[in-house]
Amino acid sequence: MAWVAVSVSLGFVGMAVLAWCAFKVWLAVRRFGRELERTGRRLERERSALLDELSRMETTRPSQPPGDGVRST
């Protein structure tokens, strides 16, 4: 009968280890989500600054006729 108690206790220990691992994964996913959110906000600021600069450059640069490109021959 001792083997029953040992197997049940090992089952509970195994479940505790799995719960601990799941908790660690949950914490890592939460940290990763925060990091993605922070990076997204930072990149959005950079993206808007680049778009503003591009629109400013397009308005100040004179447009070229379609046939006046660089030729490779």
Image (cartoon, rainbow, N blue to C red):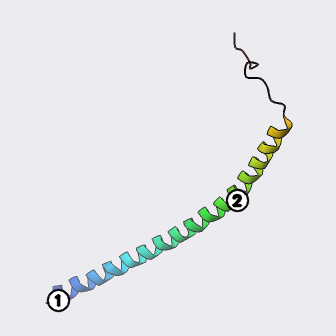
In the shown orientation, is residue 43 left or right of residue 52? left
Asked which quadrant contains residue 56, the reply is top right
Q: Residues within 10 Å of mark 1 (few under 14, many from 20)?
A: few
For the N terminus, the image quarter is bottom left
Q: Earlier in the sequence, mark 2 or mark 1?
A: 1
**Residue type highlighted by circle 2:** Arg
Left or right: where 17 falls relative to 66: left
> Which element carries disc 1, helix, strand or loop?
helix
- The residue nearer to you, when weighing 38 against 26, is 38
Q: How many marks?
A: 2
Which residue does the numbered mark 2 point to in the structure image? Answer: 42
Q: Residue furthest right?
A: 60
**Residue 37 in picture, x, y percent from top left:** 62, 64
Q: Amino acid at mark 1?
A: Ala
Q: Residue most toward the front?
A: 65
Disc 1 target residue? 2
